[in-house]
Image: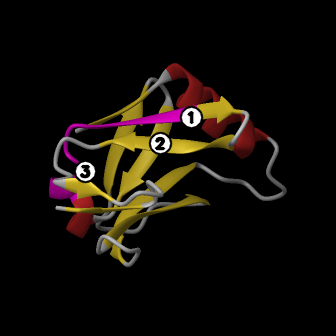
Amino acid sequence: MLTLTDKARETIDRLIASADQPLTGLKIAVNSGGCSGLQYGMALVETPAADDQVVDCNGTKVYVDPLSVEILSGTTIDFVESLEGSGFTFDNPNAASKCACGKSFAA
């Protein structure tokens, strides 16, 4: 369904371990917005919603919003660090195009 690189998984696990409250995984959803029409939403959460699809990525739990499952199918999530900054990146085979800033996409 989706894949986390080792670097993404390590980053998520580190953030969960250092949180002030008990967290169990990463919630991902595709939302309307951005200059290309769609954008990724991510949040560390205590529990998944009842209808979330739970994906186990080598022990790291990812909770996918049910309306986002199809558009996220086959996506690889990475965490990159560079001189320009750091953050999660998405390699989504279902994205027809991305905006210049890389923060939104069209399906």
Note whether 31 is above or below 2 in the view shown: below
Tag 2 secondary structure:
strand
Q: Which mark is residue 89?
A: 2
Q: Nearer the viewer, mark 3 or mark 1?
A: 1
In this rendering, position of residue 54 left or right of residue 61: left
The quarter of the picture where residue 56 lies is: top left
Mark 1 or mark 2: whose residue is earlier in sequence: 1
Residue at numbered disc 3: 72
> Residue 76 location in percent, x, y?
34, 34
Residue at numbered disc 1: 79
Residue type at mark 3 is Leu
Note whether 100 is above or below 31 in the view shown: above
Note whether 69 is above or below 5 in the view shown: below
Say if the magenta span includes residue 76.
Answer: yes
Note whether 38 is above or below 76 in the view shown: below
Tag 3 secondary structure:
helix
Q: Are marks 3 and 1 in contact (CB under 8 Å)?
A: no
Magenta residue span: 69-79
Query: In terms of depth relative to the viewer, which is nearer, 28 or 21?
Result: 28
> Residue 15 location in percent, x, y?
72, 43
Q: Residue at x 39, y 43 (%)?
A: 90
In this rendering, position of residue 1 left or right of residue 55: left
Q: CA distance from mark 3 to mark 1?
A: 17 Å
* Quarter of the C terminus within the rendering: bottom left
Would you call the spot at circle 2 few (<14 residues within 10 Å), some (14-19), or many (20 or more)?
A: some
Tag 1 secondary structure:
strand
In this rendering, position of residue 14 left or right of residue 51: right
Mark 3 or mark 2: whose residue is earlier in sequence: 3
Give the residue furthest to the bottom. 32
Q: Residue at x 37, y 74 (%)?
A: 35
In this rendering, position of residue 95 left or right of residue 80: left
Q: Are marks 1 and 2 in contact (CB under 8 Å)?
A: yes
